Image: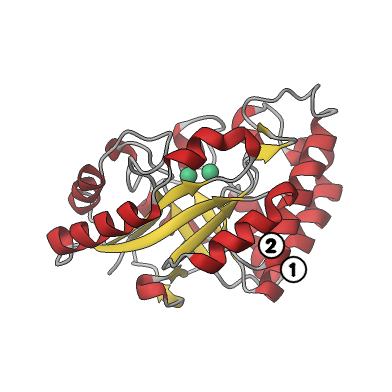
Amino acid sequence: MTIGDYHAHTRFSMDCNETMEAQCRAAIERGISEIAFTEHVDHDTCDDESRAHYRYEEYVSEIERHRTMFGDRLTILKAAEIDWNESIRDEVAEFVANHEFDFIIGSVHNLKHTYVGFTTLEAMGGPRMMYDDYLDQVRGMVDTGFPDVVGHLDLPRRYHNVSMWDVDAGHFEARVREIFRLAADRGVGFEINTSGLRRGTGATFPEPRVLDWFVEEGGSILTVGSDSHRAEDTGHSIPEIYTELRSLGIDWRTSFVGGEQKRVSLPGYPARRSIY
Ligand SMILES: [Zn+2]
Ligand SMILES: [Zn+2]
């Protein structure tokens, strides 16, 4: 029986103060058997500080050191959360070509060189334009095929109190379905990011309602991650999400241990109260 947290950060990410050791110990304590340290890799001009903070060689040697310390209890994946938008297409392609990882999340964090959490709906031309712009970037990223999974689809919802479905359910369903089809074609999957259960909307990113569309459009690569920036959040709600996935008819997740993509069965948990 394995539980994987496929989205966790350490001090190698600029917005995180947690040590890799504390993250590993927290994971083991909570019965997590696989953890992916998906440090931020940023290239946008608004992320210069984060870009300067990232140190690949040192990160790799720390991964090796922690594998030696914890390898008998925890499988540690060498991973990255790589930011993408059209303006940094070439830089990301070059980075991906020159660095090796077991697992890569591709995330769209910025619109018009501003973090989606710092912009206003007015500055984005209203919620419809913001979500259309956001999905244009997600689509562009999926089309490149570089990520193993797309990070926190629906991220703007963490910061802006309106969902795509409130704005225009039909229009955005069609857009998201088209992105799922393209992703299936490009070999790109999606993650269920549990951070929204702790902050913001009280729901995962994306919301489970889109999983039916994901499967219908041919989706076959799926990970679950906490997006933990503190040891106390590591593994957060992952067993509950596994239960939720099972109730939606999805009894598998994707593992990337050793950089090898493999479908694994979800552990059978006793039924719990639905968290949605
Ligand atoms: Zn992110
Ligand atoms: Zn993250």
Q: Residue at x 79, y 23 (%)?
A: 123
Q: Please name which of the two marks, 2 or 1, marks the residue nearer to the observer.
A: 2
Q: Position of residue 193 (x, y in %)?
A: 50, 48
User: Sequence-wise, which precedes: disc 2 or disc 1?
Assistant: 2
Instruction: Identify the secondary structure beneath mark 1.
Output: helix
**Residue 249 appears in the rendering:** no
Residue type for callout 1: Leu
Residue placed under numbered mark 2 in the picture: 142
Q: Report, in whole angstroms, how far the alpha carbon at label 2 lies from the one at label 1.
A: 7 Å
Where on the picture, by quarter, is residue 117? top right
Contact between marks 2 and 1 (CB within 8 A): the answer is yes
Q: Is residue 250 left or right of residue 141?
A: left
In the rendered view, would you say 46 is above or below 34?
A: above
Residue placed under numbered mark 1 in the picture: 182
Colour pattern: secondary structure
**Residue 6 appears in the rendering:** yes
Instruction: Identify the secondary structure beneath mark 2.
Output: helix
The residue nearer to you, when weighing 1 against 126, is: 126
The residue nearer to you, when weighing 5 against 82, is: 82
Q: Is residue 79 left or right of residue 168?
A: left
Q: Position of residue 172 (x, y in %)?
A: 80, 48
Label 1 crowding class (10 Å Cα cut-off): few <14, some 14-19, many 20+? some
Q: Residue at x 32, y 33 (%)?
A: 17
Q: Which mark is residue 253?
A: none
Label 2 crowding class (10 Å Cα cut-off): few <14, some 14-19, many 20+? many
Q: Residue at x 13, y 59 (%)?
A: 69
Residue type for callout 2: Val
In the rendered view, would you say 246 is above or below 203?
A: below
In the rendered view, would you say 191 is above or below 25?
A: below
The residue nearer to you, when weighing 122 against 226, is: 122
